[in-house]
Image (spheres, grey):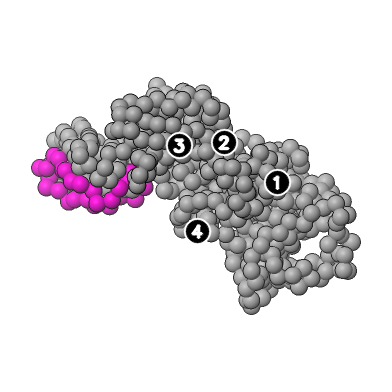
Amino acid sequence: MKHFLKPILFTLFCVSTLLLKAQVPILNSYPTSSAVIFLDFDGHYVDNTSWNYAGPISCDPSGLNNTQITEVFNRVAEDYRPFALNITTDSTKYWSAPVSKRTRVIITTTYSWYGSGAGGVSFMYTFGDAANTPCFIFSSLLGLNVKKVSEAVSHEAGHTLGLFHQATYDNNCVRISEYNPGTGTGEIGWAPIMGVGYSQNLTLWNIGPNPYGCSNVQSDIDIITTRNSISLRPDDYADTYAGATNINFVNNAFNIPGIITSNTDIDMFKVVVPSLGRFKLDAIPYNVGTGNSGSNLDIQLTLYNSAQTLLNVYNPSTLLSSAIDSLLNPGTYYIKVEGKGNIYAPNYASLGSYSLQGSFTGGTLPLRRLELRGAINNNQHQLAWTIDADEQITKLILETSTDGRNFTTLTDAATTLRNYNYDPLVSGTIQYRLNVTFDNGRQYYSNIVTLKKTGSRNRPQLISNLINSNNVEVQSPGNFNYHIYDFSGKSLTSGKLVNGSNHINTSTLNVSGMYIIRFDDGASGAWIDKFVKQ
């Protein structure tokens, strides 16, 4: 059999560590599913499989303790959350599953039978193999590092389901790397699960070329579902206003779980605000630690009023979580939850579980109007505001943020001040809001204003990052070049801009999603923006 199956490696160099034993906790991600990926942490005797060309293999336990095992399980379970598939540490679930619907992943410190050149190894297409052929994760070669072990587990299990690696190519279709390393840094730094994601936080399924040619595009989700007869999980919430799920406050708060299972999945909720007051909502993707570690979902929230008119879109550019913090009049509101791509990650597989944690604080407003306005003049940010109130202002703070979520004080202004002008020290998108406190002790926030500092020289600007037609409109201060790329780095179209308004035809971009546009002046200046084609 091994002559017909190609073993797939997840390469990493050896690190020596102390091996630990643990009584494995029983964990299941979707216990009602008959399709099973069994994570075997307590050692296993392997015989009569394609691996046994030199005899039986006696595998020691993983060397991980209970806390580490649980985190590995949680990370892997979140990777496979969209699918009707049970990630389990329970061997009885494996043995009771249909032979055609199961695979075993052995996490072990034993590797000498294979060698020290890989962190994991798998045969292709062994999910449902009648010989119960497992795949292996060599935990000691991964330094018993929970993040690395988890990435290797999801990756090698992907091979058993029929996935090749996600590779990278240059513009001439010359392969750069068999393993796509992804791009970016921080919370939204991204890599494909079937690439190499050891150093990236956001590791997702992907659609992109495999190592056997730049035109061999592999859709990970389609292969997992169609080849293995594994469906996506049933939709948990309706996607229409009429079917929106009612949110009920308990002690002026609520906590609702949900799952986004596809890039077309929308979860709609309806909330009735009983009186004038402050509505706060934190939309948090499942995570295993700070910085949304281990999350697979970049959440976008959209707020509508009772007439189904859009009020605001909330999607911080450098965070996976999102939040609403707004003063609302009494009435009915709708909240749309969906997964979105970002500047690094495509929209293809921003999927996974989340929680909505909300609260409402009612009370009479001490003001009739609190409005912030902003403009840019010669790179100077000019902010002005209107406060119409009966109560006396005791504190007025102008706050700033670069991610739309975490605000800090820009200036603690005089309570009589109504404008503020300055030249930001950093380039990029900056968001502003007013934090106002009145003499009755109540505190309120204004609307958020977004301005962008582009540096000392003018540059082309996208009129909108959301494209609903076959044209991208760009306002240019002169003659510039432009290039449009997809998120694999493949160049799709290019051309030249002239002074004034330019309309770039995007009819050749026949796939909805996020794209990168690069402007340059042919010399030393270059700028990058992103846009989404719907």
Of residues 445 and 120, the one drawn nearer to the viewer in this rendering: 120
Q: Earlier in the sequence, mark 4 or mark 3?
A: 4
Amino acid found under the numbered disc labelled 3 = His
Badge number at residue 289 = 4
**Mark 1, other Cα within 10 Å: few <14 / some 14–19 / many ≥20:** some
At mark 4, the secondary structure is: loop
Q: Earlier in the sequence, mark 2 or mark 3?
A: 2
Q: Nearer the viewer, mark 1 or mark 2?
A: 1
Badge number at residue 263 = 2
- In percent of width and height, residue 427 lies at 30, 48
Badge number at residue 483 = 3
Residue at 44% across, 31% down: 495
Q: Earlier in the sequence, mark 1 or mark 4?
A: 1
Tell me where the magenta segment starts and ends, as one range: 403-431
Q: Nearer the viewer, mark 2 or mark 4?
A: 2
Q: In the figure, is residue 458 to the left or right of 161?
A: left
Q: Earlier in the sequence, mark 2 or mark 4?
A: 2
Q: Is residue 227 above or below residue 201?
A: above
Q: Is residue 26 above or below residue 237?
A: below
Q: Which residue is mark 1?
A: 212
Of residues 462 and 78, the one drawn nearer to the viewer in this rendering: 462
**Mark 2, other Cα within 10 Å: few <14 / some 14–19 / many ≥20:** some
At mark 1, the secondary structure is: loop
- In percent of width and height, residue 520 lies at 38, 40
Q: Is residue 77 visible?
A: no
Indicate the quadrant containing the N terminus: top left, top right, bottom left or bottom right: bottom right
Residue at 65% across, 71% down: 14
